[in-house]
Amino acid sequence: MGARHAFRRLSIVKPSAVAVFEAHNTAMRVLVVEDEVKLGKLLVRGLGEEGHIADLAEDGTRAIGMARAMQYDVILLDVMLPGLDGYGVCRRLRRDGIWSPVLMLTARDAVEDRVEGLDAGADDYLMKPFSFEELLARLRALGRRAPRERPSVIEVGDLRLNPAAHRAWRGEVELDLSAKEFALLELFMRHPGAVLTRDQLLERAWDIAFENRSNVVDVYIRYLREKIDRPFGADSLETVRGVGYRLKATA
Ligand code: CA
């Protein structure tokens, strides 16, 4: 009995409209992160039968180690893992600069769970129970993306910023920034090491044209330092006298 049939029996399957099989699948290297060993092994076997190369990691720590050692085309990541959960694994991978597409497996149909997964840097999610056909279709879609195409998080040193989710962190600590502080920080993080003049900052971070109000920038830089540097004993936002400001490339 093929794994696809075993999968049907073990799991649950309604034939999926998504299941459109391509004549020639490109072989992918897939990391399956799943603590339910029976399901994990079945997934690995099923993917193998489809011509893919799949490895199994039974917990988050092992998954991170394997993803560091090998570039996977897709990481299939269960949310509910003992110890470090799927969100934590995904955040750690992204922070380490590992951009393999992540397909998150979630057991719950809660919108917040999906949002949390996407915030953590996942590319797509699939709700358990799912059909093997749908899993294959999603994997193919993700496998077509180049892993470095669209980082969802910008990193400079240990500063991280997720533009879509409007969240930013220094290390593990989430920063509580106003909309304007966030806009400024994003601007700096998109140009690490570059000097941005007050005019450039005004023009790009403020919608309104200020006339000779460049001290507004100075005030906001002070606010920003109070949030991203001072509490952490950091000194990442430099004043370049007579020119403007610069975020150190190492933050
Ligand atoms: Ca699990």
Image (cartoon, rainbow, N blue to C red):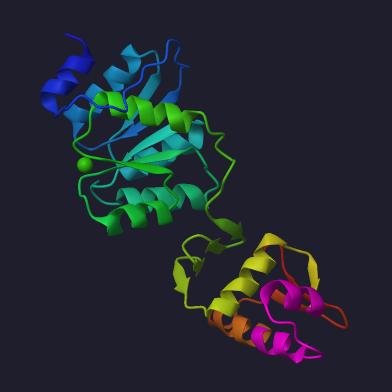
In which image quadrant can residue 106 be found? top left
| Image height of 172 relative to 99, above or below | below
Q: Can residue 251 be seen in this view?
A: no
The image shows residue 162, relative to residue 245, as above or below, that is above
Q: Quadrant of the C terminus?
A: bottom right
Q: Which residue is found at the position 33% from the left and 44% from the top?
A: 60
Q: Closer to the camera, 71 or 188? A: 188
Most foreground residue, 190 or 158:
190
Left or right of 111? Residue 144 is right
Name the quadrant containing residue 236: bottom right
Ligand 1's quadrant is top left
Task: Pick whichever, 112 or 27, lies toward us.
Answer: 112
Residue located 85% across and 82% down the image? 241
Please state the horizontal and vertical placement of residue 102, each as a whole percent of the image.
42, 40
Residue at (30, 22) in percent of width and height: 44
Q: Report the number of numbered marks.
A: 0
